[in-house]
Amino acid sequence: MNILLLTSDFLPNIGGMASHALELARAHVQNGHRLELVHPVHGAGEDHIEEMEGFIVHKLFVNSQTPKWKHVLYIRKVRDYVRKLHAATAFDVLHWHDLTPNCWSTWTLRNDLPLVWTNHTSNYLEMFETGVGRTKIKLFLGHADAIISPSRELYEKSTATGIDPKRNFYIPNGVDAAKFRPDNSFGVIDKDYAIDPARPVIVCPRRLEPKNGVEYFIRAVPLVRAEMPEVQFLIVGGGFPDERKRFEGLLREAGEARDVFFTGNVPNSAMPKFYALSTIAALPSLMEATSISGLEAMASGLPLVGTNIGGIPEIIEDGESGLLVEARSPEQLAQAFLRLLRDADLRRRLGEGARRRVEAVFAWPEIARRTTAIYDVAAAHWKSRH
């Protein structure tokens, strides 16, 4: 197939949507498809085209000094660029990965080619809670020929909104099981962060965005330390500097600022080393689809403690590939950590179960194959409309 991906979040960003778009593009190419990716961004810069790992990336800049018009200019530029590209290439499908403003960009392209949207955004869940929000969802997405949800919760809410179930599909996020695998080589990361690799490390691979629940991970620190003072804590992710200051204040108030390491943003290429250094991984989220960082930790053979919300129970089989706890509960997080720290056999069994589950269900070539099947459904729906 000739596939066009559209995403406003891509490299050099390192968030979940950017990672998803990159890994899906790689897997589509690996599966024998031809792919191009359009990455529009607000801001100043020079448009350029580059080849990356077997596919082509088109980076577009929309620089407007008038905030009122920035989305209008963005939509028009994306529409015109995609139409020109489609005329030259004849894509079989356009697959986009964010809600706004690309829902409007793709609305202008609804008569040009089949359209597929993957729902990555937690804002979607917030919108669903109000009648006005559900009306907006139908308005934003009524033109999509198929919608992919990476969690059962998002899938069910898309259907409940009134979107035709025949064009609504569940496909989880994936992970690169070759890049992320059990490994005991520490590299230089332990030295960079003054971490002692001989002592336990609990890693929380989360940006400091409030929805990611890092606050509850921080509040679990003194509860763990009260029984196992030698444990180290590692928060890998940045953004939200005010939240980091608040977390550091909470740790100082509890007298537990020692051996709690904040790395800030790190490139995804470095993440295998952080997992290799760790004993347990934590996913304390308050909202989540299928967490890519959770899958990376599982692929690395770590026992994963995650909250029982959104798509997390779909990746963690409680007691088989990790442990589930209630959201907003530092007490339950701490008890799960202590249970694992005290039981090496349980850590090993859950880590091995996590790796097996990733290999069977969440490897990217399989996710891409299932996604391609949705493209065929979208193409049939588009033809029926024309």
Image (tube, grey):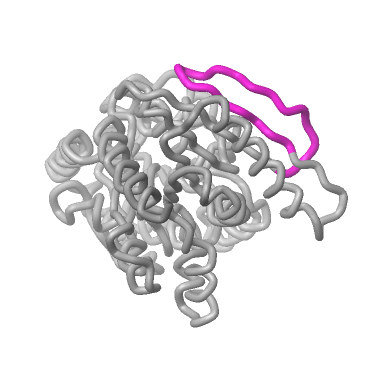
* 236 w.r.t. 122: above or below: above
Residue at 30% from the left image edge and 47% from the top image edge: 377
Q: Is residue 363 left or right of residue 162?
A: left
Residues 231 and 183: in front is 183
Q: Is residue 98 left or right of residue 349?
A: right
Residues 282 and 28: in front is 28
**Location of residue 36 in the rendering, given as x and y in whole percent from the top left corner:** 50, 28
* Majority secondary structure in the magenta region: strand
**Location of residue 330 in the rendering, given as x and y in whole percent from the top left corner:** 39, 65
Residue at 86% from the left image edge and 54% from the top image edge: 66
Q: Is residue 282 visible?
A: no
**Location of residue 299 in the rendering, given as x and y in whole percent from the top left corner:** 27, 34
147 in the magenta segment: no
**Location of residue 146 in the rendering, given as x and y in whole percent from the top left corner:** 37, 53
Residues 102 and 172: in front is 102
Residues 102 and 248: in front is 102
Residue at 46% from the left image edge and 37% from the top image edge: 21
Q: Is residue 178 visible?
A: yes
57 in the magenta segment: yes
In the image, the segment drawn in magenta is: 42-61
Tell me the quadrant of the picture where the N terminus can be found: top left
